[in-house]
Amino acid sequence: MKKSLPLTGYWLAGAWIPDRRIADPRPIACRTEFTVRDPEKLSLRISSCEYYALFINGEYAGHGPARSFPGTKAYDEVDISPFVRSGTNALALLVTMPTGEISHRGRTGWWCDCHDEKGRVILQTEKKSWVCRTAGWYDTFCEPRSLSSGRQEHISAEKEEKDWKTLPLQQLSEAWLEPFVLGPAAWTPPWRTMRRRGTRMQERVDLPLVLAGAYTASAEIFPVETLADNFNALTFQKSGKTVFDGKLRAGEVYTFDLGKTRTFIPRIKVLRGSRQIRLESFCDSRHSDRPQVTSPLESAGAGFADTYFLNDDCGQEFIPIVPYGGRFWSLRAAGSGECEVSLQLQSLEYPYEKCNFFRSADENLEKFMAIADATVRSATQEVFVDTCWREQALWTRDAAVSGPASFYLFGDLAVWKESLRLIGEGITRDGVPCAVVPAEVSHIALTDQTFAWINSLEDYYMISGDRKFIREMRAGVMNFLRLMRQHTNADGLFAPPQWSWHFIDWAQVDRRPWSLAVNAMLYAALVSANKLYNDKFTGEFAELVRSGLMKFWDEKKGCFINHLDGADDTLAETVFFMPEKNFPNALPVHGNALLLARGLFPAAKCRQAAATLAGWLLPAGKSVEKFGTSWLGIVIRALLRHGQAPAAWEILRERCGTAVACHAPTYGEMFPFREFNSAHGWSSSAAEILAAQIWGLEILEAGFRKIAISPVPGIPDSELLLNTPAGKLHLRMVNGKLQIPAAEMAVL
């Protein structure tokens, strides 16, 4: 469909919702019809306030929408041609109510239109062409999870109106009413403008039914309010079954292994049912000798457990509105009697194109890259997420690490750009950043991760050459840095605002006022901002912070020290939500590594400081708590850049080697990596290390137009192919000598 087609029709709502904390959290069911003569190549543009599940002629056609802030509401484009037939077609939606976690205060709402390949309007959203009702077959106990991972969905088939997704509108019950018109598609507060999503739709891929275990347990029907806790408290016995034949008796539990932690959708079609049976759905990232479900994060009703009460009919199909995340999925039958189902598990995969490759005579290095590949895929929805399992939310540092990894793995820049865009749009006019995006401003706003966002903008620009996007982000950068200037004294010393979460890393870090790590992060961000905008304010601010930073330098120790005493008593400690303790005796790994990695150390002191850093981190196996997975790329770059290649190789092999040793398909959130983990986006920096850092690849002109290559010692025979904005780059290392079979850019 052409991008220039105007947005047609209106935003509609089932009810006026004055506040995001609502009394009835059940979704809204929506129906309309449209007529088609030629069903080929039809594109549906669709958006909603929060989540939607789309059905065409009763067939599940997808979910959404793409994340966005109200000011620039995103819409999805769905190819509905495979679901449409000549004549009248039924379109059905389930739209969840707003909670504020991934949306904003306001009302529930949806919009869609449909065009053929010639741009002719097939469907536009009009009040009288739709009917809607509260989906009363959902239990009122449908709380959202603590972050935007989903909600509990408890469904009673007996209460669901039969065939509501496909019946002609005039045959629906009296419960269906006309919706409210909220306003035109192009401008309906708080959706001030609408834009096409910046990334592609996820694709559904069928997964094999791999049985991790079959069990028997109590068949008791527990209250949905305590379902997860009750499930974890059950005593299970192995049933001895090795295959799932679709038949479930009350008290039976089947646990399936999805191969890795991933986003997925279970589709359960009832072939034979009984109203005495309730099916229960659970997911987790781990499995040992019994099934389990992820423990609720904020309340007993917070996610990870759904239920389906059957009726005495067949043909019912249960598909969650919000996709699940996890590696293991358990299906339990509670109540009495038995049922038979057809079960299909579908993985949701972002359609990355595999146009880059890294090969090596060292099998472990290839495995490190393959695990990074699987991790990035698991952590990609339409943006990078913290993890598809527990928190399907975009945290800033995940984008800063996953973005470069996605480029070096797949040549992709779109997901990185979209993630950076949302982070920038989440900064208020007075400079306050969101903790996660899109959401409302939180009291745990992460100022230190926002510094990493500015560094990531520079990294993105140097790879992409996308100056237009960098200009779009300028307001967010400047508003944030001006706020940070208010928290920097005349000596150039910075203390994070008391309302912010002074996080840095899941590691031992000194977080008192005037700590090295956060001052180094501010300085690095200012240097990046000044390179991007050449602004008088950022230049002067950078010089001020540099003067303060040099007060941390200890000539005898050969490094920057952890902390400066003398902070004003009014600079109290910032918010801690784990790690709860400060570590005043921690080694200053983070600040020193960052300044070395980004070339911000005084040149004459670099080798001395790098040697000191290596000494802190060796032997590698005993320095696990000194830095976390999201800092691996920074630490390795610092060592490689300044003559400490042996230490860098040892740390890389030890850290990533733990995943290989335990056969972990993805990297987790923390060291050491374990077999069952979260597939955490920020742990994927092995991709950048192996595709850029060990080759000494430095981008000298934005857009990869000019590069320098200076391989570090220790590279085994290896081969790298990158597709860059400037063209192909093909490198080989043979017997310690660099070969360049192809380079479509200037190479120094």
Image: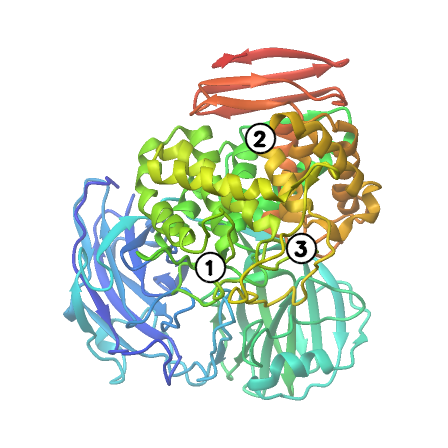
The answer to whether 28 is drawn above or below residue 714 in the figure is below
The amino acid type of the residue labelled 1 equals: Val
| Quarter of the image where one finds residue 216 | bottom right
Q: Are the residues flagged by discs 1 and 2 in contact, CB closer than 8 Å? A: no
Dot 3: element: loop
Mark sitting on residue 436: 1
The amino acid type of the residue labelled 3 equals: Val
* Disc 1 to disc 3, C-alpha distance: 22 Å
Percent across and percent down for residue 653 are: 78, 37
Name which of mark 1 and mark 3 comes first in the sequence.
Answer: 1
Residue marked by disc 2: 599
Which numbered mark, 1 or 2, is in the foreground of this view? 2
The amino acid type of the residue labelled 2 equals: Gly
Mark sitting on residue 509: 3
* Disc 1 to disc 2, C-alpha distance: 29 Å
Count of numbered badges drawn on the protein:
3
**Is residue 395 visible to us here?**
no
Name which of mark 3 and mark 2 comes first in the sequence.
Answer: 3
Percent across and percent down for residue 711 are: 67, 19
Percent across and percent down for residue 154 are: 50, 79
Dot 2: element: loop
The reply, left or right, for residue 34 in relation to residue 568 is left
The reply, left or right, for residue 99 in relation to residue 716 is left
Dot 1: element: strand
Q: Residues within 10 Å of mark 2 (few under 14, many from 20)?
A: some
Image quarter (top left, top right, bottom left or bottom right) of the C terminus: top right
Q: Nearer the viewer, residue 324 or 386?
A: 386
